Amino acid sequence: MKKKLQLLQPQIFLLCLMFSFAGFAQVTLFSEDFEAATGNENSTQPAPYLNWQSGQFATTPPTNNNYFWILDNTRCNIINGAYSLAVSENNPATTGTLPQYRDNRIASTLVYYTIPIDATNYTGVTLDFNWICEGEGTFDYGSVLYSFDGTTWATLPGTYSGQTTTQAVTGLDLSVVDGQQFYIGFGWDNDSAFSGYPGFIIDDVLIEGTSIPACITPAQPTVLNLTATGDTVSGTFTASVNADNYLVVVNTTGVAPTPINGTNYNIGDTIGAGNVVADIDTNTTFTATGLLPSTLYYVFIYSIDNQCLGGPQYNTVNPLTGNISTTNSVYCTPSNELVIYNTTVKYINDVEFLGTLNDVSNLNS
């Protein structure tokens, strides 16, 4: 019926963090407390109840008799309010520790919210929920599931058992669904021997995410200063007020390339023929190496909005531009670090002069 996959998922500084993330607070994407239920018991199968649907995985015998229900306090140890979601055998028990599950038949079941949750414009998605589950260690336990199609399910790391009082899960990492629509579910597995009541009880489900802002076109940086050697061009520039990254490209044509929005570039990449990415980061310094001596190079610097929906977004209009020629020689620096057969080898060892100048040997330094 369903296919199940297991996934192996100082004050100044704090003040800066507060300002950095002030515009990126988490918002609620989904919440459920089950208080819209009525009556004593409401099965989530065969038909959904409050948009929660039970099912079983294909490896489970069809008569396992354990499904999820939305139950009141006559059928369940309620976590909050008047109702909680719990795994229970059919015909929920009304006495003893509640709810109870069938423990003499292997079960692998799930319950999921049938309406997809939209996280397409969100990042850093997290899950909170409260739970109780005694179960039986690694044999009878609850789990958290997610799916992108409502059919193929993956399991988040962690299982839930061994607790007869309310436990709180806060900030469970659900970032695997960032930027996508997804389904949330809970799983129950038990073997066919022994038991520990109650089974998996769930309440107060909350899913949050950080809204991804719309892209802006940041202002270009200013005041470019360049220096060059035989095969290197280095530079500094003044930062833009609203860019969070900068792309530096060099070429020999003087024609500015056009970076493509939504594309991430790395040092060494090309943007069209002959346009080489020399640097891409948050700072205002760069060094382009491996260049040709005695060659005129053009430098183009683009501001980037890197933390936005559909980003990165590049300001491709009037990038900061400069040019400089590399020098005509690439010099090596004398070194005494190379040792061959216990003899120190230097780039410059002896210098001999003609005429009245004295010969010089530099054997000691």
Image (cartoon, rainbow, N blue to C red):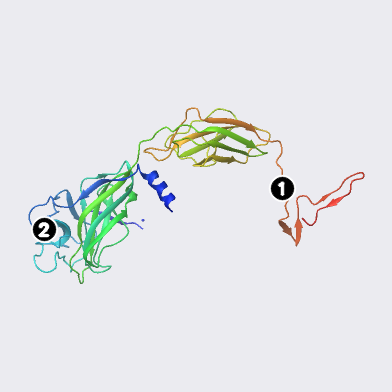
Q: Report which residue position mark 2 lands on.
A: 72
Say which element carries label 2: loop
From the top left corner, tell me how far across and down residue 213 is, in percent: 35, 38
Amino acid residing under circle 2: Asp
From the top left corner, tell me how far across and down residue 70 is, in percent: 14, 56
- Label 1 neighbour load within 10 Å: few <14, some 14-19, many 20+: few
Residue at image location 48% in from the left, 32% down from the top: 220
Instruction: Confirm whether residue 105 shows in the render.
Output: yes
Amino acid residing under circle 1: Thr
| Contact (Cβ within 8 Å) of mark 1 with mark 2 | no
In this view, the residue in front, 322 or 153, is 322
**Left or right of residue 244, residue 347 in this image:** right
- Disc on res. 318: none
- Disc on res. 333: 1
**Left or right of residue 137, residue 278 in this image:** right
Residue at image location 66% in from the left, 35% down from the top: 326
